[in-house]
Image: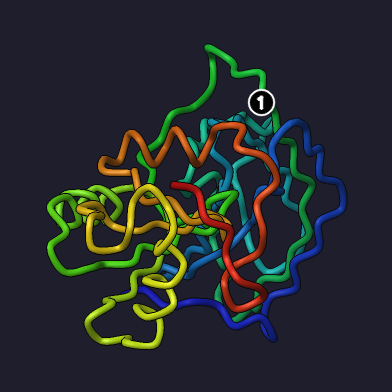
Amino acid sequence: MRKSILATFILIISANAFILAQDRPVKIIDERVNNRLMIYAVNENEQDLDVAIQVEGTGFRQRGGVPRLHRVPKASKVNIASLVIERGRVPVYTYELTVKDSLSRRVIRKPFTRIKIDPKKNILVYLKEGCTTCDSLVQKLDSSYYNYRTINLEEKQEVKDFLIRTFKYTKTPYDSISNPIISLGGTLYSEIGTYDQLLEKLHGTDGDMKEEEEEGEPENKN
C-alpha cells in the first residue's frame, strides 16, 4: 500500500545543497510504503547527476555508514534512501544533499522513473488542417521527457485567423504550410517537420526568445 506523507507531518530542511552546473536544483521528495519512508532525488535537468544524501532526525532508523552517491539520470527520479519508521512515531528529518555533475564510475545505479520536465523554451504546437507531419511529431513529444501544449486550430478560429494574418506576407503563407506551426518560447516556426528539427531549434542559438503568446505576440520565423 502506498501513500504520501503530508507536509504537516514531515519537516524537510535542506541544510546544505552543493549545486554545480545543473540549471535546476535537485529536489527531494518522500513517499511512505508500509513502514518505510522512501526518499527520492528528482533531477529536472537535461544532464545526469550523482547525488548523495545525509539524513538526520527522529522517529526512524536507517542504515549506517558513509552516504553513497547514486546516479540520477536526466529528467528522472531515483530512490536514494530508505528510512524504517519506528512504531507509533512520526518521522521528522533534515538532510544534507551533495550533487555532482562529474560522474563517478563507482556510483550506485538503481532503477529510475522518467519524469516530464519543462524545456528551456516553452513548446506550443499549433495543429492545422492538412498537416502531414503533425501526428508523428506529437507522438515523439508524447514519448519525450518534455512538457508541451497543443492547440487545434480547427477549434480555435481566432487563433487560426491570427496565424493566417501573421504568415500572409511571408514566403510560406498559411495555406502552403504542411507542417505544424510551432512556438518555441514565443517565436513561431513553420519549417519544423520532425522531432530532430525541433530539438535543433530548441537547443540552438536562435537569439533571445520572447515569452509565450499570452504575454506578447510571437515573433515569426519562417
Q: Residues within 10 Å of mark 1 (few under 14, many from 20)?
A: some
Residue that lies at the very extreme toward the right in this rendered image: 15
For image coordinates 65% across by 51% down, the residue present is: 209
Where does the image place residue 57, in percent across and percent down from the top left? 77, 61
Where does the image place residue 159, in percent across and percent down from the top left? 40, 81
Residue 41 visible? The answer is no
For image coordinates 53% across by 59% down, the residue present is: 122
Q: Is residue 151 above or below residue 134?
A: below
For image coordinates 70% across by 46% down, the residue present is: 208
- Taking the image as shown, residue 123 lies to the left or right of residue 70, namely left
- Taking the image as shown, residue 204 lies to the left or right of residue 109, namely right
In-front residue for pair 122/53: 122
Reading the image, the residue beneath label 1 is 101
In what quadrant of the picture does the N terminus appear? bottom left
Q: How is the image coloured?
A: rainbow
- Taking the image as shown, residue 32 lies to the left or right of residue 185, namely left
In-front residue for pair 139/104: 139
Where does the image place residue 20, in percent across and percent down from the top left? 77, 32
Tally of numbered tags: 1
In-front residue for pair 15/73: 73
Q: Is residue 53 above or below residue 6?
A: above
Residue that lies at the very extreme toward the front in this rendered image: 169
For image coordinates 40% across by 35% down, the residue present is: 110
Identify the element where label 1 is drawn. Answer: loop
Residue 145 visible? The answer is yes
The amino acid at mark 1 is Asp
In-front residue for pair 130/133: 130
Where does the image place residue 71, in percent across and percent down from the top left? 52, 31
